[in-house]
Image: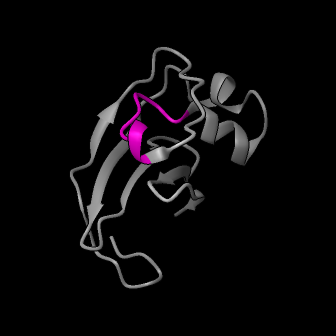
């Protein structure tokens, strides 16, 4: 995985099934990554209630990767059907993932 400014990331994808809503919105993302799930990010990107309606109980691909510049990023993508996801990095950025 390579970020726009040239930082390369290393991490291993896993398959998880979120079973609860983790509503924490990190004040300092570096202190909270990785989180059990990115419920707040799904709702921020796709609309309030999206995580509960579309992600909770579904299999998602999840990775927490560390960049060669020290940035940590956590990514979650739906595994079946819709090709979308979200990401949060240790710099406080929130990303919409489309593939």
Relative to 19, is 55 on the left or the right?
A: right
Q: What residue sits 36% from the left and 38% below the top? A: 34
Q: What residue sits 24% from the left and 72% below the top? A: 68
Q: What residue sits 49% from the left and 59% below the top? A: 91
Q: Quadrant of the N terminus?
A: bottom left
Foreground of the two, 15 or 27: 27
Expressed as whole percent of the image width and height from the top left, the position of residue 4 reads 47, 81
Can residue 79 be seen in the rendering of this structure? yes
Foreground of the two, 77 or 10: 10
Expressed as whole percent of the image width and height from the top left, the position of residue 74 reads 40, 49
As drawn, 58 above or below 61 = above
Q: Residue furthest top?
A: 20
Foreground of the two, 22 or 17: 22
As drawn, 24 above or below 2 = above
Q: Quadrant of residue 54?
A: top right
Specify whether residue 37 is painted magenta: yes
**Which contiguous range is marked in magenta?**
30-38
Q: How many marks?
A: 0
Specify whether residue 87 is painted magenta: no
Q: Residue furthest bottom?
A: 6
Expressed as whole percent of the image width and height from the top left, the position of residue 75 reads 43, 50
Main SS, magenta region, reads: loop
Q: What residue sits 44% from the left and 42% below the top? A: 79
Relative to 17, is 97 on the left or the right?
A: right
Relative to 13, is 43 on the left or the right?
A: right
Q: Quadrant of residue 98?
A: bottom right
Q: Quadrant of residue 25?
A: top right
Expressed as whole percent of the image width and height from the top left, the position of residue 11 reads 23, 55
């Amino acid at each position: 995985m390579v970020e726009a400014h040239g930082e390369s990331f290393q991490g291993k994808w896993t398959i998880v099934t979120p079973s609860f809503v983790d509503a924490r919105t990190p004040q300092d993302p570096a202190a909270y990554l990785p989180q059990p799930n990115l419920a707040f990010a799904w709702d921020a990107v796709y609309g309030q209630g999206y995580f509960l309606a579309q992600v909770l109980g579904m299999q998602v691909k999840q990775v927490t990767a560390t960049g060669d510049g020290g940035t940590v990023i956590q990514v979650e993508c739906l595994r079946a059907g819709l090709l979308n996801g979200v990401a949060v990095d240790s710099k406080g950025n929130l990303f919409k993932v489309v593939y």
